[in-house]
Amino acid sequence: MGSTFPVSIASAGTRIFRAAPVNPADPVKIGWGRLVPSVDHVGGVASFDYLQQAILQSTAGVFGGYPINMATMPVDNDDTQNRFTGFAVANPSTENVNVTLYVLDENGGITDVLSPPELNPLGPLKQTAKFLHEYVPTKLKFKGSMVMVGQSGKTFAVVALVQTQGLLTVIPVIPSKAPQVP
């Protein structure tokens, strides 16, 4: 369940928020945040800590972004190196959005076209995160790219996830697609 609250930020000012479970024994929570500024030129960044048994394993930083209707991200999966690529996507609107996922090989050829149930539709103010091999198990060792396209021009917010030997990082996506992707 989400919550909203007003925040006042002075010109050139900063506000820092830390979200933590009320009880440290609470299970992991997955979610996202959205800043809705009342003026132009307001931005944000976030960092997420991954802890196991209260020990920091990794931190991932995420730049604030704007909703887009297409995104391309590189994929360099290698299960022998414990390296996997995925995405975290959110629907910041109050309408459903349907997202198609295209997988392209190193030469730009489309190898898979997917309409995952959790993305079709991705409900209003909902989010999900997945790795490519969770959708296509044959992509445990794969180099290429993934392209996400919002149907009917609808938009979503997305970042690419890269997990290497248990460490997670976030990389920005390219807000466009190759011409062969519908």
Image: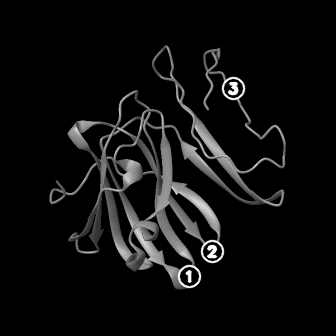
Q: Is residue 1 above or below residue 75?
A: above
Are the residues flagged by discs 1 and 2 in contact, CB closer than 8 Å?
Answer: yes
Whole-percent x, y for residue 95 in the image? 36, 30
Q: According to the image, label 1 marks what residue?
A: 81
Q: Position of residue 30 (x, y in %)?
A: 62, 46
Residue type, mark 1 in image: Gln
Q: Please report whichever mark, 1 or 3, sits nearer to the chain's N-terminal start.
A: 3
Residue type, mark 3 in image: Arg
Q: Residue at x 61, y 22 (%)?
A: 4
Q: Are marks 1 and 3 in contact (CB under 8 Å)?
A: no
What residue is disc 2 on? 165
**Picture residue at 60% right of the left edge, 30% below the top:** 2
Secondary structure under the numbered disc 3 in the rendered image: loop
- Judging depth in this view, the residue of 87 and 65 nearest the camera is 87
User: Looking at the figure, which quarter contains the N terminus?
Assistant: top right
Instruction: Give the Cα separation between the discs numbered 1 and 2.
Output: 7 Å
The label shown at residue 15 is 3
Is any atom of residue 55 visible in this view? yes
**Other residues around mark 1 within 10 Å, as few (<14) / some (14–19) / many (≥20):** few
| Total numbered labels | 3
Question: Residue 156, how many percent across, how many down?
Answer: 38, 40
Quarter of the rendering containing residue 135: bottom left
SS type, badge 1: helix
**Three-letter amino acid code of the residue under disc 2:** Gln
